[in-house]
Image (cartoon, rainbow, N blue to C red):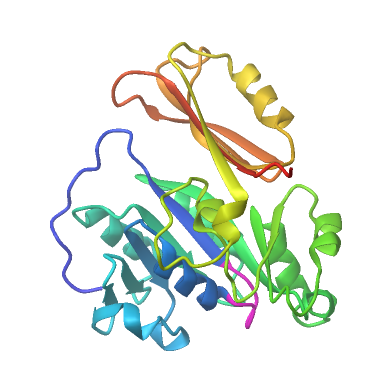
Amino acid sequence: MGHHPRRRSLPRGQLIPVTVIGGYLGAGKTTLLNHILASTSERIAVLVNDFGEINIDAALIESATSSTMTLTNGCICCSLVDGLSAAFDAMLELDPAPDRIVIEASGVADPAGVSAFAHGPGLQLDATVVVVDSETIQATIDDAYVGDTVSSQLAAADIIVANKADLADVQLWLTGRYPTTLITPATNAVVAPELLFGHAPTPRAAASHEAADIFESWQITRDRPLPRAVIERYLHSLPDRVVRAKGIVWSSDRPDRQLIVHRVGRRVTVRVGPPWPGEESTSLALIGLLSTP
């Protein structure tokens, strides 16, 4: 990936969130990636296998070399010419650091294998997103040649984007097969970035869709430690309309370490994180569907 800026240290305890986008050939991964780049307010570093395989919106490209693209919104795209580990090292050398790293896996890759790299130093896996073609997914998953590949991709997903929902409605079918996974229908891969990324940035004018209008967000803070068992029970007890929850908890079980918590759909993960960089406190963000009148 060429010459990189000098290595600079991330602030103690600060991790760069990583989002992995997977899905079989033709599902709409690059369409989703373009939508994210056009509508995000974050400075994103995108890692892709080969620029020749994708089509970044020309209106976003400021400059390009054989291994990188600099975009007009401050985002950058890097080709994985030297492998995923080398690409992550290069991202950690950038100053300023990206707000997020997004990886577009190849159409036949297992997203779980790609996501495993996002647990390295300085990184934190946010979510594994798998895009499916709603019109063809039921036939593809039963295909003798590619069915196992597609099944493995879906099994690795925290979020399934049922793309091309205008052509077929497979949400109920997918829910029956993957009951703990968050499943969201989409047309032209238009999904609110705050749903994929687990927080609610201010929508930009480019995000001219109604998806962002169906979510609301809450913030929970606490300046006293909580038992890990209490926070786990709370996350599991949240109603189904809360589609994402994430944050850092001050746990009385390990008061010296951050407790990293996630809920995507009904899937809950809790793990011990790095030492506290400053004052200990609990901060939990929740994203939910707006209540119907």
The answer to which quarter of the image holds residue 206 is: bottom left
Vertical comparison of 65 with 211: above or below: below
Query: Of all residues shown, which one is farthest toward the bottom?
Result: 52
In the image, taking residue 129 as reference, residue 149 lies left or right, namely: right
Total count of labels? 0
Residue 157 in view in this figure: no
State the image coordinates of residue 162 (x, y, percent, origin top left): 70, 68
Q: Is residue 161 left or right of residue 283?
A: right
Front residue of this view, candidates 96 and 60 = 60
Magenta span contains residue 207? no
User: Which residue is located at x 35 percent, y 77 percent?
Assistant: 81
Q: How far from the left and from the top, in percent, is residue 254?
A: 48, 17
* Rendered-image quadrant of the C terminus: top right
Q: Quadrant of residue 190?
A: bottom right
State which quarter of the image contains the N terminus.
bottom left
Q: Is residue 97 above or below residue 76?
A: above
Q: Residue furthest left?
A: 6
Q: Nearer the viewer, residue 200 or 123?
A: 200
Is 238 left or right of 197, judged from the image as shown? right
What residue is drawn where x is 69% and y is 46%? 265
Residue at the image position 51 percent from the left and 77 percent from the top: 30
Q: Position of residue 50 (x, y in %)?
A: 41, 82
Q: In this picture, which residue range is highlighted in magenta?
A: 22-28
Give the farthest residue toward the front.
Answer: 293
| Residue 149 in view | yes
Is the stretch drawn in magenta largely helix, strand or loop?
loop
The residue that appears at 50% across and 58% down in the rendered structure is 193
When asked about the image quadrant of residue 41, the answer is bottom left
In the displayed structure, would residue 56 be above or below residue 94? below
3 vs 165, left or right, is: left
Residue 55 image point, x, y percent: 44, 85
Judging depth in this view, the residue of 53 and 243 nearest the camera is 243
